[in-house]
Image: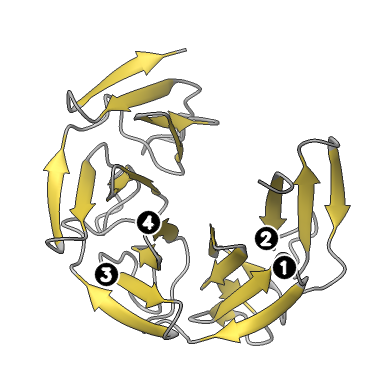
Amino acid sequence: EGTKQVCVVGGSNDSGGFLKSMECYDVDEDRWSLMSTEFREERFGMATCVLAGNVYMVGGYGGAEGWFKQDVDRYNIEEGVWSRMADMNEAKRRHCAVVLGDFVYTLGGMSIGIPTLNTVERLDVTENTWTNVAPMLSARRYFAACVLEGCIFVYGGRNTSHQTLSSVERYDPDTDTWSTVASMSKKRQDVCGAVLREYIYTHACGGWDENAMAFKSVERYDVQKDKWVDVA
């Protein structure tokens, strides 16, 4: 199984500066370590995911020009080395990245002159090429995404009209189609999510609504029943 680690990549500090460092938390030893190898340039608002022993850092905002990024960098955990991958087709930040099968998917976010995106791109890590797949039914930023039972689920966020969403969509890679499923009980943006066993959870701070009302509530989605229920 190897070492169990949680990695935190980039972001911004207390003075508003962007970071190009990565820290990892060792679950077994209960300690944080600053990785000795920094990535190429400071980055904020990017998306990350892990596939086959590599951390993928996708898009974001920053660099010398302080602008939207379509850059993709990969960190090999065993070798401790960063390498450059093919750029996405579109620069973006405030998007999501997930792994499904042997592919990295990026979804939604915002881009230069476009406040909210519905586009979805897929990275073939073997061929190092990006391909656009079916777009989401609704444009979203500040949302959450996860993978369960061979499908991608996206939920919450803000749309092009700056409205906070409760809607949820499911992507089937076999048919390259999106469909709507049951909505959350609350509209949430800046929401976090996770999969535990056969359920999807909205967790952490629970997000906040369009009136800047923060939530501490947690909801759980049952795929089989297509239903959200409140938990602790």
Say if 180 sits above or below 118 in the image: above
Residues at marks 2 and 1 touching, judged by CB atoms closer than 8 Å: yes
Residue 89 is left or right of residue 11, and the answer is left
- The image's mark for residue 209 is none
Of pointers 4 and 3, the one earlier in the residue sequence: 3
Residue at 19% x, 54% y: name it.
172
The Cα–Cα distance between marks 3 and 2, rounded to whole angstroms, is: 24 Å
Marked residue nearer the N-terminal end (1 or 4) = 1
Q: Quadrant of residue 102?
A: bottom left
Mark 4: amino acid: Arg
Local crowd at mark 4 within 10 Å, few (<14), some, or many (≥20)? many
The reply to whether callout 1 and callout 4 are in contact (CB within 8 Å) is no
Residue 141 circle label:
4
| Separation of residues labelled 4 and 3 (CA atoms) | 11 Å
Judged by depth in the image, the label closer to the viewer, 4 or 3, is 3
The image's mark for residue 11 is 2
What's under tag 2, amino acid-wise? Gly
